[in-house]
């Protein structure tokens, strides 16, 4: 059997889909061929993944839709695709399914309406109750498995996700083994960026946190962020040979290697934290305008989520919407000391 999985973006979501890959592999065995279509910038996430046979990258800036179709056609000619598993459920992935309409397809239900409805309920207790009673939004990595277990003939249901948690990957998500990126160890990664501005804890708070952690511990600290995250220059006020400032200096593969070897990752609800978790590294994850209930909270046993409850929160399902209040309370109300305390607790366990 040959399954083509489709998830173009974003980084964290592509990482979370490795749970589906591991599940399909454990269920359908080694005769299954798994191919994955994603955006070119995320190909590194899945390259050399032990369970993925082919990764097809799509560069939206340099390639046309015809180019992508050509790549999939070539793959289909080499080994006929039996099923398209659309894990993105957007217009783009719909277009791809239509282009290959002769191949059977399955599409995930992203629970958009349920999540939208829950953003309208500002009472935490009522929101939790509504979710438990009517929606049952659990961790996204487990939701897909539960939704499709009957279709793939997996009668063990919840046991299956437990097995995956305790299986060879030790985690429900996992990525490929990587070459070492050498840094003095042990170190903690600080990842101050996120896909949307309102999902970011203020950079000054991250700077203050790093200063306090440098004083309180003997660990090294690594600042990881992308080439466009120049706001991280704020860290340059810290003078310490235990601070490794790598904003914009690493490739995605190198960042993955750094995360894999870290003892802990502190950051926003972002791709970096999802990558760390995929390698079994505990995370301290800060949630702003979104609710961890939506299914994207860290799932590792030692990971911690910090999220403040406010009358205006959650104000969107993804954190993309601009804040309508005079201040960014959901993030600003998270204090440096409480994050520091959580980091120290998790670092001791790790
Ligand atoms: S403070 Fe309230 S309105 Fe503003 S981003 Fe946070 S949750 Fe949304």
Image: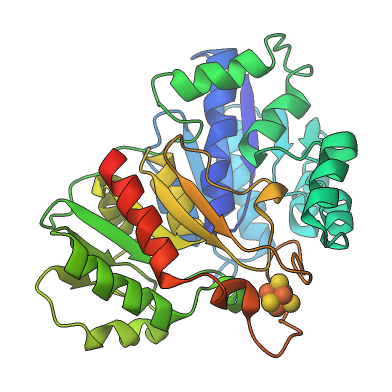
Q: Is residue 202 above or below residue 106?
A: below
Q: Is residue 263 visible?
A: yes
The one of 177 and 75 positioned closer to us in this rendering = 177
**Depth order, front residue of 252/158:** 158
The image quadrant where one finds ligand 1 is bottom right
Residue sitting at x 26%, y 57%: 188
Q: Position of residue 121 (x, y in %)?
A: 87, 59
Q: Quadrant of the N terminus?
A: top right
Instruction: Using residue 129 as the reference point, say whether residue 328 is left or right of it.
Output: left
Answer above or below: position of 262 versus 109.
below
Instruction: State the residue in front, 65 or 325.
Output: 325
**Which image quadrant is residue 9 in?**
bottom right
Q: Is residue 100 left or right of residue 249?
A: right
Q: In this view, does 28 lie above or below 131?
A: above
Residue shown at 57% from the left, 73% from the top: 331
Task: Give the x, y percent position of residue 241.
Answer: 9, 73
Q: Residue furthest top?
A: 155
Q: Does residue 248 lie above or below 133 as drawn?
A: below
- Front residue of 14 and 240: 240
Residue located at (48% from left, 14% from top): 30
**Quadrant containing the C terminus in the rendered view:** top left
Labels in figure, total? 0
Q: Is residue 228 visible?
A: no
Q: Give the percent coordinates (x, y) of residue 312.
A: 78, 72
Q: Position of residue 104 (x, y in %)?
A: 80, 30
Q: Which residue is at a point 49% across and 56% down the rendered structure image? A: 285
Tell whether 206 sits left or right of 269.
left
């Amino acid at each position: 059997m040959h399954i083509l999985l489709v998830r173009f973006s974003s980084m964290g979501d592509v990482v979370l889909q490795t749970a589906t890959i591991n599940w399909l592999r454990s269920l359908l065995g080694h005769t299954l061929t798994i191919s994955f279509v994603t955006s070119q910038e995320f190909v590194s996430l899945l390259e050399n993944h032990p369970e993925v046979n082919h990764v097809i990258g799509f560069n939206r800036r340099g390639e046309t839709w015809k180019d992508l179709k050509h790549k999939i056609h070539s793959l289909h000619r080499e080994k006929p695709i039996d099923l398209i598993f659309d894990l993105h459920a957007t217009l783009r992935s719909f277009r791809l399914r239509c282009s290959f309409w002769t191949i059977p397809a399955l599409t995930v239900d992203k629970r958009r309406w349920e999540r939208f409805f829950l953003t309208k309920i500002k009472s935490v207790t009522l929101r939790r109750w509504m979710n438990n009673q009517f929606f049952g939004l659990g961790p996204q990595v487990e939701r897909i498995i539960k939704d499709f277990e009957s279709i793939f003939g997996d009668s063990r249901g919840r046991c299956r996700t437990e097995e995956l948690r305790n299986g060879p990957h030790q985690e429900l998500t996992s990525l490929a083994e990587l070459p070492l990126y050498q840094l003095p160890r042990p170190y903690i990664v600080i990842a101050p960026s996120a896909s949307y501005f309102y999902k970011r804890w203020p950079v000054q708070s991250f700077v203050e946190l790093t200063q306090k952690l440098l004083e309180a511990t003997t660990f090294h600290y690594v600042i990881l962020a992308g080439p466009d995250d120049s706001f991280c220059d704020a860290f340059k006020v810290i003078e310490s040979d235990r601070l490794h400032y790598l904003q914009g200096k690493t490739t995605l593969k190198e960042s993955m290697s750094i995360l894999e070897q870290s003892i802990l990752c502190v950051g926003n609800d972002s791709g970096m934290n999802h990558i760390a978790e995929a390698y079994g590294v505990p995370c301290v994850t800060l949630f702003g305008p979104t609710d961890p209930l939506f299914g994207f909270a860290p799932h590792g046993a030692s990971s911690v989520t910090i999220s403040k409850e406010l009358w205006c929160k959650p104000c969107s399902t993804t954190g993309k919407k601009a804040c309508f209040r005079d201040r960014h309370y959901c993030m600003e109300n998270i204090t440096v000391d409480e994050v520091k305390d959580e980091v120290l607790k998790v670092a001791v366990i790790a």
